[in-house]
Amino acid sequence: MYSEIRTRQGKANLYKTDKNTYAVNLPVHVCREIFGKARKRIRLYINADSRENAVKALQHLENIQKFLDNQDWQGLINYEESLNPRKPLAKITLQSLWKDYLKAKQEGWEITYREGDIKTTTKLLNSLADIYVQNNLHDLVKHITEITTARQTKRYLQQISACLTWARKRRPIKENPLPDFISTLSTKRLNDEDTDICPFSIAERDLIISAFKTGEFERYAGTHTRYADYIQFLFLTGARTSEALGLKWEHIDFEKKVIIFQEARVLAASGGKGIQKKGLKTQRKRTVPMNDRIYDLLLCRRRKTINLELNIFADTSHNQFRKSAYKNVLAGLNIAYRKPYQTRHTFITILANHSDLKLHQVAKICGTSTKVIEDHYLATNVDISRLPDV
């Protein structure tokens, strides 16, 4: 066995802990003046079970005393940190982090967000083999970019990046390399629904509404006429499809002849008829006055409705409407296909160019801005031959 090591008064001292390991006690005046403690020890993480270990411990003691003699306090602190044997981090998978992230955060998210981006990202991660966050995420990024568009890639990576940022504050995650990569992704849409504007003419609008009312091109009775109210409502109010589908009877004031759009029904990753949510795309609510055509349409529909608790267009599946009836009617009328969202663009274009309303009034009715109307909806081929008398 090795001989016991004696302490030295006023100097750093080596001693054995109750766990039979070595530690160094610093002088009392250093503990108080430098560390603000009555006692300060530096663990050596060496077992006191052999002469060889005793020699190692004495060498550490000598090194520590040198820092004390030189009053190199930062060097002493760094030396103490270097003695700590860092345990290798357990391999943590991105999938396990994602589960913890969802448990911690999902209660504060809107249902549309949970059923949309979060659900699709969860499905993606569950379909992949374990991804260890200690490794380079290059393979994950490469895989996502190969299976989907740049826009969807960015959406996936933004969700994963948010998870890693959250985890860095709670788990041993060294870095999050995704933000720098995400910033390089170009996701500009060439055909965004709010800027891809190709409205129907008034004549085309009226032909489409008439075809739905009469069922002119339907192969089976009722397959087109069942959507007559829906298509007419879209054309004559400029409502977004989500706003029309989310509309309830309680949102209609027949006495004041106004519609209060304040909820929307949006499609979700899980499919189905969508999810009802409070608020609209760009605002909390919007009040739209009814003309006689819309008033009569809604009043007639209300009289036929058995359950007024249901949404006004509860029996309407927008996807089925678009795939079956809408496409067939346009083809039958020999009108170039445009997405159903063009009903909104048609309404705004007509109000901006063929009504006496001021632009700010049109903007308020349609839930947009005067700048958007000026940039995208006003006719530009109008020649002015003389100034008005003002």
Image (cartoon, rainbow, N blue to C red):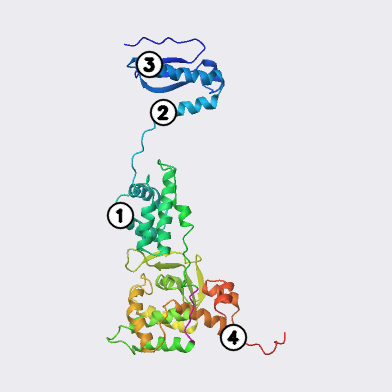
The residue identified by callout 3 is 54
The residue identified by callout 2 is 84
Measure the C-alpha gap from mark 4 to mark 2.
77 Å
User: Which sits earlier in the primary sequence, circle 4 or circle 2?
Assistant: 2
Q: Amino acid at mark 2?
A: Asn
Residue 32 place in picture, x, y as percent: 54, 19
Measure the C-alpha gap from mark 1 to mark 2.
37 Å
User: Which sits earlier in the primary sequence, circle 3 or circle 1?
Assistant: 3
Q: Nearer the viewer, mark 3 or mark 1?
A: 3
User: Which sits earlier in the primary sequence, circle 3 or circle 4?
Assistant: 3
Measure the C-alpha gap from mark 3 to mark 1.
51 Å
Q: Amino acid at mark 1?
A: Leu
Residue 85 place in picture, x, y as percent: 39, 29
Which region of the structure is painted magenta?
195-201
- Quadrant housing the N terminus: top left
Decide whether the magenta segment is chiefly helix, strand or loop.
loop
Q: Is residue 226 above or below residue 180?
A: below
Viewer-side residue, 241 vs 287: 241
Q: Amino acid at mark 3?
A: Ala
Measure the C-alpha gap from mark 2 to mark 3.
18 Å
Q: Residue at x 54, y 27 (%)?
A: 74
Residue 142 marker: none
Measure the C-alpha gap from mark 3 to mark 4.
95 Å
User: Which sits earlier in the primary sequence, circle 4 or circle 1?
Assistant: 1
User: Which sits earlier in the primary sequence, circle 2 or circle 3?
Assistant: 3
Q: Nearer the viewer, mark 3 or mark 4?
A: 3
Viewer-side residue, 300 vs 269: 269
Residue 168 place in picture, x, y as percent: 43, 44
Residue 381 marker: 4
Q: Amino acid at mark 4?
A: Asn
The residue identified by callout 1 is 128
Q: Nearer the viewer, mark 4 or mark 2?
A: 2
